[in-house]
Amino acid sequence: MVLILAGLAVFVGAIVQGAVGFGLGLVGAPVLTLLNPELMPGAIQVVNLTLPLFTLAAEWRRVDWRGLGFAVLGRVPGSVLGALVVVYVSVYTRGIFVAVMVLVAVALTARALSVPRNGVTITSAGFVSGITGTATGIGGPPLALVYQSAKGPQIRATLAMFFFLSAAQSLGILALVDELPSRALTTGAILIVPMVLGFLVSGPLRRYLDGGKVRAAVLVVAAASAVALIVQNVVSQVVSA
């Protein structure tokens, strides 16, 4: 039953990420955490490592390599801090903190035409993404908010390359701090199947959003990620009480 529900969540998340550029973590991470916290964040990071390859196969030419460099520069120290958060901070506390940060960011950017996209903002987004991605499996919103005014293919390609490198880094760091059990790796490998199916289904939605609706989709998905985190943590607290 755990694999069926987790597979459904990953399938839906892959549809969202295949269309918008991110979203697998926001759908899959809360469900997996509720089903079995011991699988997180390792299991979702295995899927996060694989899905970007499908996007890059089709749109790798649209990667913003300069912006990617700044994002990775911030991501490296952020992921180290994120690993420390996993070890020393409770799941509830870090989840609520991340959710509040994302909601504030969405509220601020929704009132403006766009967030300035430069070395400082991209590096900062990469740093925050490193913390949240490593600690919770949801690292897309910070960088996506910076790229919200870009064209759909550029958002998807740049985030895909960033997610691939980020997931590889997070898995390595989680292994170093002994927070990557073999069961998480096995579960993540099994979930690649529904992930692939979800990506294949995302094609029509991707073409629809590329017609000028990407920015709105980014803000909606980012806000949904925050709400999902809040629900996840409140429910987990009630269950454990």
Image (tube, rainbow, N blue to C red):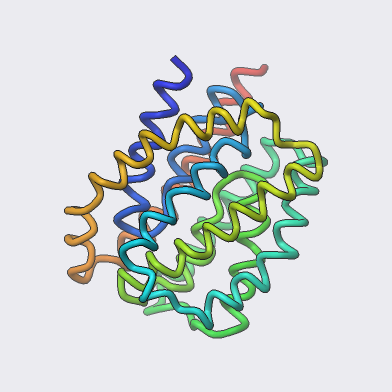
Q: Residue at x 59, y 72 (%)?
A: 71
Report the residue that reaches farthest toward the top: 1
Q: Is residue 107 visible?
A: no
Number of marks in the image?
Answer: 0
Q: Residue at x 70, y 57 (%)?
A: 79
Rendering coords of residue 85 (x, y %): 76, 47
Give the position of the N terminus as an image quadrant: top left
Residue 195 appears left or right of 102: left
In the figure, 197 relative to 6: above or below? below
Compare residues 178 and 118 and report the one nearer the observer. 178
Residue 203 appears left or right of 93: left
Q: Residue at x 38, y 40 (%)?
A: 195
Rendering coords of residue 51 (x, y %): 43, 49
Q: Is residue 162 visible?
A: yes
* Res 158 → quadrant: bottom left
Compare residues 216 and 178 and report the one nearer the observer. 178
Residue 109 appears left or right of 96: left
Residue 107 appears left or right of 172: left
In the figure, 4 relative to 215: above or below? above
Q: Residue at x 23, y 58 (%)?
A: 206
Give the position of the C terminus as an image quadrant: top right
Compare residues 9 and 112 and report the one nearer the observer. 9
Rendering coords of residue 74 (x, y %): 67, 70
* Res 56 → quadrant: bottom left
